[in-house]
Image (cartoon, rainbow, N blue to C red):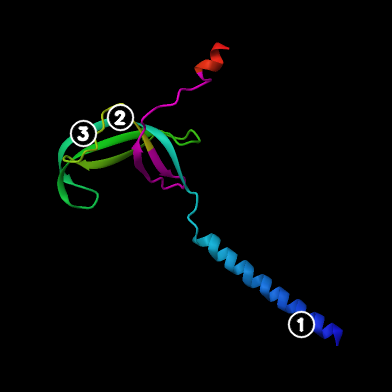
């Protein structure tokens, strides 16, 4: 009788463990993957005003901004472009530094994520160099 009760209890524990692992696996599957990274890029070309279509397909007069960037692993150079309507407040000039968000998977898709207000200096801080 004890063997039957312990065996039944053990079976319930095994089934509960499988249910918990399935639930946790489903939660992990629904989380956004870390397949997107950010890096810095530099505006290499500004073209416009141009009459054409925006990414949404709407006809407009826009300014096209092309940014060159390298991945965090040193791959590249890659280019990403974006079209801004002429009336928008967003203005870029050649040489501006911007943040590029890119997909690490092979059909590499990237987008401009914003402008960099400051550019960190490479190497040691000036106080550490003086010491």
Q: Residue furthest bottom?
A: 1
Q: Which residue is mark 1?
A: 8
What crowding class fits label 1: few (fewer than 14 Cα within 10 Å), some (14-19), or many (20 or more)?
few
Q: Quadrant of the C terminus?
A: top right
Q: Secondary structure at mark 1?
A: helix
Residue furthest to the top in view is: 130
Residue 8 location, quadrant: bottom right
Residue 72 locus on image (x, y percent): 48, 36
Mark 3 vs mark 1: in front:
1
Give the mark nearest the N terminus, 2 or 1.
1
Quadrant of res 5: bottom right
Judge by depth and name the residue closer to the eye, 89 or 80. Answer: 89
Mark linked to residue 44: 2
- On screen, 35 above or below 31? above
Residue at mark 3 to residue at mark 2: CA–CA distance: 10 Å
Find residue 1 and report its horizontal and vertical position in percent. 86, 88
- Image height of 39 relative to 5, above or below: above
Q: Is residue 41 left or right of residue 33?
A: left
Q: Does the magenta-highlighted stretch encompass residue 123?
A: yes
State the mark number for residue 119. Answer: none
| Tag shown at residue 47 | 3
Q: What x and y, as percent, mark residue 31?
A: 50, 58
Cα–Cα gap, marks 3 and 1: 74 Å
Instruction: Tell me where the magenta segment starts and ends, as one range.
Output: 100-125
Task: Classify 86 as above or below 12.
Answer: above
Q: Secondary structure at mark 3?
A: strand
Query: Which of the pair 128/100 is nearer the observer?
Result: 128
Left or right, 106 with reference to 91 = right
Residue found at the very far right of the displayed protein: 2
């Amino acid at each position: 009788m004890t063997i039957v009760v312990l065996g039944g209890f053990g079976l319930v524990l095994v089934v509960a463990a499988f249910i918990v692992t399935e639930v946790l696996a489903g939660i992990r599957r629904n989380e956004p993957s870390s397949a997107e990274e950010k890096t810095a890029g530099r505006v290499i070309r500004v073209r416009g005003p141009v009459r054409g279509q925006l990414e949404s397909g709407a006809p407009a007069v826009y300014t096209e901004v092309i940014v060159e960037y390298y991945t965090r692993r040193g791959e590249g150079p890659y280019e990403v472009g974006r079209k801004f309507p002429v009336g928008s407040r967003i203005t870029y000039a050649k040489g501006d530094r911007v943040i590029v968000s890119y997909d690490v998977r092979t059909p590499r898709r990237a987008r401009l994520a914003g402008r960099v207000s400051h550019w960190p200096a490479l190497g040691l801080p000036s106080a550490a160099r003086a010491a």
